Amino acid sequence: MIGSEIFPADWYMLRNAPTLDTPSVVIYKDRVQQNIDAMIVIAGGADRLFTHVKTNKTPNVVKMLLAAGITQFKCATLAEAGMVAQAGGTYILIAHQLVGPKIDRLLALRQQYPAVVIASLVDCVAIANALNQTFGAAGLTADVFLDINNGMDRSGHPLNADALRLYQYLHSLTHLRCQGLHVYDGHLRDPSFAERRQQIDHDFADVAALITAIEQAGLPRPMVVAGGTPTFTSHALRADTYCSPGTCVFWDWGYGDRLTEQPFLYAAIVLTRVISKPNRGLVCIDLGHKAIAAENPID
């Protein structure tokens, strides 16, 4: 649901709260729009953004992003990619390496939306070959980015001599179209923007060296999709880098408390009700702790 009628003094207060069922997510459209506008200003243009939808997962929010001129998106799942394609997105990057039956699902999604670029990540020869074979059998070409591990150690190919060789191999496959590099450094979250930027620039130096090596090998300069929300304001300073923030569309308390240079507004709440008062000083609400996928201590 979209909440718009709010009290001026307390942006989160709802005039129609008694009529709403709980638990519910309430999205404040005006604040979402302000966050979208701020993202575009920081990036220097809507065409530099690959906005990640894993936080909002909402077609209406995707349509707001599209209306603002953002046509490129990152997704965590194939289901999210399908949602973005259905909403009108034209360029989608699934931000992990698809394995097993997910390759067939990627092919099916591409066949369902032939006018949409739906790329995925690759960090090894085996998956590159699997994509090439599956898409080749269907007479299609798979769009891919080489996933680079520049310090987070969650996924991606290490920044070593083999990275260039793998990138060249991706370009050699007849049913793969290698678009560039994907670099996610979500582990860099120092509260100090100066310290965070120094760490980001230090870890990105080897990525820049790889880009130079790719060009020296005679290949086109790669697209580089880098970072997430914590590193957004640093990567935005690189004119030739695409940025992929996502949390800032709704914003959250943890980032707002730490990333103080970022101008985003809290734009969503979870509405819940007290359903029982079992003892003095205790209340029970209808929102379960597991229902909100809490990843931090409840205090």
Image: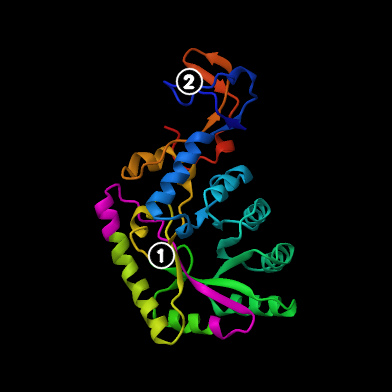
Q: Which residues are magenta?
A: 170-198
Residue 184, located in which quarter of the rendered image? bottom left
Where, quadrant-wise, is the C terminus in this rendering?
A: top left
Give coordinates of residue 41: x percent, y percent: 39, 50
Q: Is residue 236 left or right of residue 60?
A: left
Residue type at the position of mark 1? Thr
Q: Position of residue 89 (x, y in %)?
A: 61, 56
Q: Position of residue 192 (x, y in %)?
A: 26, 48
Q: Is residue 280 magenta?
A: no
Q: Amino acid at mark 2?
A: Phe
Q: How many marks?
A: 2
For label 1, the SS is: loop
Please indicate whether residue 210 sits to the left or right of residue 19 in the image: left
* Crowding at mark 1 (Cα within 10 Å: few <14, some 14-19, many 20+): some
- In this view, the residue in front, 47 or 229, is 47
Location of residue 182 in the rendering, given as x and y in whole percent from the top left corner = 47, 67
Q: Circle 2 sits on which residue?
A: 7
Residue that appears at 61% across and 44% down: 58
